[in-house]
Amino acid sequence: MLAIAQYAEVIVDVPTMQTNQPYTYKVKHNFENELSPGMRVIVPFGRGSRLVQGFVMRVFSQASFAGELKEIEALTDLEPVLDAEALALGPWLAQTTFSFLISCLQVMIPSALRAKYSKELELTNKFNVPEAVRAFFGAHTKKLFDEQKVAEPLRSQLLTARRTGMLKLNYVVNDRLQAKQVSFIKAALDKAELEQAVSKLRANARNLHTLLTYLSQHPQAMQQGLLEKKLALSPETFRNAEKKGWITRFKQVQYRNPVRQLNVKRTVPRHLTPAQAAAVAAVIAQIDQQQPTTFLLEGVTGSGKTEVYLQIIAHALAQKKTALMLVPEISLTPQMVKRVVGRFGTQVALLHSGLSDGERFDEWRRIKEGQATVVVGARSAVFAPLKRLGVIIIDEEHESSYKQEKMPRYHARDVAKWRADFHSCPVVLGSATPSLESRARAQKGVYRWLKLPQRINNKPLPQVSLIDMRQEAKKTRFPDFSQALIDAVEIRLAKKEQVILMLNRRGYSSFMMCRDCGYVLNCPNCDISLTFHLDTHSMKCHYCGHEEAIPHVCPSCGSRQIRYYGTGTQKVEQELTQLFPQARILRMDVDTTKRKGAHARILREFGERKADILLGTQMIAKGLDYPDVTLVGVLNADTALGLADFRASERTFQLLTQVSGRAGRAQKEGKVIIQTYNPEHYALLLAQKQDYEQFFMREMDIRHRGGYPPYYFTIQVTASAPAESQAAKKIFETYKTLKTALSSSAVILGPTPKAIMRINKRYYYQLIIKYKKEPGLAACLSELLQKSQRSERTGVLLTIDREPLNFI
DNA sequence: GAGTTGGTCGCC
DNA sequence: GCGACCAACTCG
């Protein structure tokens, strides 16, 4: 029995610290029975009572707020968009990530459901307004008003008219959601009538002729767009035909479903190795016993982790439960998707960044309505509104893309564990190179540890050679290629085999420097050098997007000796075409994959052997499985090692192990060549041997001695402001407060200016807290945030990131 | 003295 | 995030 909903607590869509609390509203009688928690509503907020969207958290019959209450203006939903689980997860997420509750709620729903705000001016007295204002309205009494878009004299005239009461300003809250509507057409005449119409057409009406002839053959309704393509007609022809009364046109809502567009063959479960079978058995036992156990599934590349996942999911489904599988964005390749869809068919929902807002919304709705019971997706799919979760799988659990870098700064692994507790179901973390955190927990028995030590069919690991570039670089005319790599590529090209070349983008740069005076071309807004872009022939800033022309003379000393330095994919591509003029090269980097679908297209083309060499950044390292690739070259293995980040070795090791697994996946033998300036570094030597265990021990020892994770927890506090002194002052104040609040076992690193101190005209300072046990720390940090509300108005911002993955 | 500009306050 | 409000400032 529902309580009569006379009052509701609403979280409003105003992401600030001061409004990060529920507000009580009165519920109009006509939607007393309609309203329930988790629904979106539109409420008046602030002195101007502008309308904003909000989420209902609670409905009740007794108001707890003493002041005057406003009424809920409208309901946006008939059914709650957030279920009880989401309503419980939100506050937890807000607390642990130091985020606004509204941001946490928003992140759980598809962006199509997020409100879009606009303003509207209403003419209330049309007699006393200036001519320009009357012209603005034309024949209308209401008009959308975008303050930015209306040019100056008119803008202030409108605002003045508003102040004097001639105009009214209304707030409009729009759902961004638009069901996809598609134009359909149908012949309005029968076959005989159509044929008659055709005979009466003028001789030059070729397009209409084509259309009517086709329609007389196909009387059923058809999608106009498809027909346009098929018959090579323009929309104009259809409009014409409609005008003449030969066809009728109508709109129909279309369900977008990216899965069904893939033409996928059904696959059957494969036979399992004893290790795989043991892993499956261990996990499904926990599904059956409804235990929220976390497993670490450690399996070398090619050991068949995916098949283990699929059989676990199959078991969950057989128990009438659902399954969630997270995969890093870049491994969400068509190959991967096909494998899952091939096994589970249309009950699979896909959530990845390549989807449009509408497609994502449709997938979300299929999940919510229970039509989709298996969800495969990247980070944010961890919030997929599945009911009766049976298992959560996180593949490549060490991937840093599981951590969101903006508010709310959550880690998908933590959210997964929370949901697993809620549903009493197991979590499986899978990786060939687990994060040290997870591997250490497995060691301690916090996670259950499953191992797949053997590659399927005992295929040998590819032979990996390290090339010392300190010697090699001098020997060739090409600074990015050793002779060994050139020779190896040469051989593959002759044998018509494929090559993958990877450029480690971290620390990658090709900047302009003057050879005479050493001047480096920097961004005017950020403390970073501009990078050279060959395609647009310009210098760009990767942080703020600033772009300028390539200088021909040094702006500082006027010398003409200004050149670019460093290695970028574009430059390497140039070198490659010189080295191997006959080779077909595909380049894959941020520039070539910006457009939607470009990523998949490049990989497909490479898979179809339309190129001999695939050149790219990290994004090519993941999950690719090409039988004809027999050589993988890493051009610069160690650019990341130079960075002052304690995870640099871990990342380098993981990346190299991963790419090495790419060579020789099928019958042919594979070879890996890693070029490096640090051939003695343990991360490289152990990646060469694919020895994770040894790496784990070495690295743990270093972390232990340095007092880093997983031995310590870390929290990063950043202060930023338009003026450097403000940011510095803020971080030192914060430092002082923390110093007194923390126990003696905690360590504070810094405060220091960030490595890139200025981004987009803002200055950044940071400090890092390392601690083992500080029960009062979270509360202290929340209080610091609470207190810095004041300074926020002058542009001084404090942000807190728990367990950050980037320290620079 | 009306009208603009800038900073601060509080939102149920 | 944004309008209301107040105080300072500006200009004929």
Image (cartoon, coloured by chain):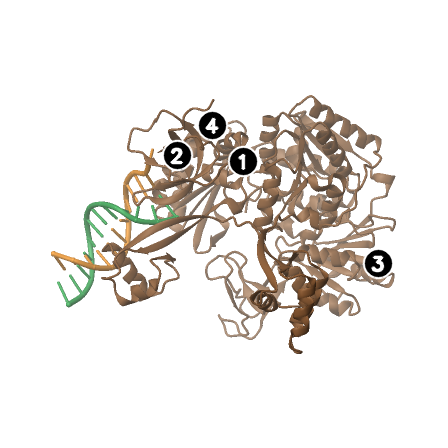
Chain colours: A brown, B orange, C green
Mark 4 to mark 3 CA distance (whole Å): 60 Å
Residue A701: give x, y in percent of width and height.
66, 34
Q: Nearer the viewer, mark 4 or mark 3?
A: 3
Q: Earlier in the sequence, mark 4 or mark 3?
A: 3
In contact (CB < 8 Å): disc 2 and disc 4: no
- The label nearer to you, 2 versus 1, is 2
Label 2, label 4: how far apart the Cα atoms are = 56 Å
Q: Which residue is located at x 37 percent, y 53 percent?
A: A119
Q: Amino acid at mark 2?
A: Asn
In the rendered image, which residue does mark 3 sit on?
A497
Number of numbered discs present?
4
Looking at the image, which residue is at 74% across and 33% down? A314
Q: Secondary structure at mark 2?
A: helix
Measure the alpha-carbon separation of dots 1 and 4: 15 Å
Q: CA distance from mark 2 to mark 1?
A: 51 Å
Rendered location of residue A696, percent (x, y)? 70, 36
Please, what is the three-letter code of the amino acid marked with disc 4?
Ser
Question: Which subunit holds the residue at mark 4?
Answer: A
- Disc sitting over residue A714 in the figure: 1
Residue where numbered disc 4 is placed: A743
Q: Is residue A749 visible?
A: no
